Image (spheres, helix red, strand yellow):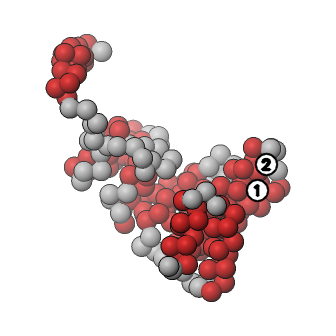
């Protein structure tokens, strides 16, 4: 089993501390692995979230941990510039309430969405950042969402998840439309009036 597989398995099994320790060891052995730095950023960001539950979000320990996460994400982008998850994580870290560097986050989300137009988190964040920046950019954001639908990322343009991990969300209906036709037909017929 590779060290990366071990880290993933430990984390999936709920052994977060052991996974973090193995990750630190892996970074010592392979310091130029962008994927590992991305994972380190995720671990640091999660740690900052845990710390902020028991203190102010502007507590120095929380801010240092967030800075560590952001540095890891930025290093991951330099080492693995084609890793779309690193763009998502870096953008989310920059756009967070504590860091609040929204313009940088928007640029990172846009670059990531251009790199991977099938990554739901990148596409939705890039699009919604455009939409919130005024009418001219809102049209570009809506077009980006429409392209995501055309690419099969979602079924409908406003179905996009926000800056959250949405691996368990389905973008296709779970039930057949026919199962609810009596309700849907009525709602759809009334849609123009709504």
Q: Quadrant of residue 118?
A: bottom left
Query: In terms of secondary structure, where does tag 2 sit?
Result: loop
Question: Disc 2 marks which residue?
Answer: 58
Question: Disc 1 marks which residue?
Answer: 63
For mark 1, does the 10 Å Cα neighbourhood hold few (<14), some (14 to 19), or many (20 or more) residues? some
Image quarter where the C terminus lies is top left
The x, y position of residue 79, in whole percent, is 52, 79
Res 70 seen here: no
Please report the residue visible at 63 percent of the width from the left and 73 percent of the height from the top: 23
Foreground residue among 152 and 6: 6
Q: Is residue 20 left or right of residue 105?
A: right
Foreground residue among 75 and 39: 39
Query: In terms of secondary structure, where does tag 1 sit?
Result: helix
Q: Is residue 119 left or right of residue 23?
A: left
Please report the residue visible at 38 percent of the width from the left and 52 percent of the height from the top: 120
* Residue furthest out toward the bottom: 29
Foreground residue among 86 and 193: 86
- Count of marks, rendered view: 2
The x, y position of residue 92, in whole percent, is 55, 54
Q: CA distance from mark 1 to mark 2?
A: 6 Å
With respect to residue 64, does 99 lie above or below?
Answer: above
């Amino acid at each position: 089993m590779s060290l990366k597989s071990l880290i993933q398995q430990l984390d999936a099994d709920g052994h977060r501390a052991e996974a973090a320790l193995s990750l630190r060891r892996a970074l010592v052995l392979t310091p130029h692995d962008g994927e590992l730095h991305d994972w380190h950023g995720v671990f640091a960001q999660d740690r900052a979230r845990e710390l902020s539950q028991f203190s102010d979000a502007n507590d120095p320990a929380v801010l240092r941990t967030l800075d560590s996460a952001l540095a890891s994400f930025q290093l991951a982008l330099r080492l693995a510039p084609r890793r779309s998850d690193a763009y998502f994580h870096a953008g989310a870290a920059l756009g967070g309430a504590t860091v609040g560097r929204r313009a940088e986050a928007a640029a990172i989300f846009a670059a990531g969405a251009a790199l991977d137009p099938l990554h739901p988190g990148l596409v939705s964040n890039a699009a919604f950042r455009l939409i919130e920046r005024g009418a001219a950019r809102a049209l570009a954001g809506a077009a980006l969402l429409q392209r995501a639908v055309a690419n099969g990322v979602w079924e409908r343009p406003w179905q996009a998840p926000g800056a959250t991990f949405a691996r368990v969300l389905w973008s296709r209906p779970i039930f057949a439309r026919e199962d609810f036709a009596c309700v849907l037909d009525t709602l759809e017929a009334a849609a123009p009036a709504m």
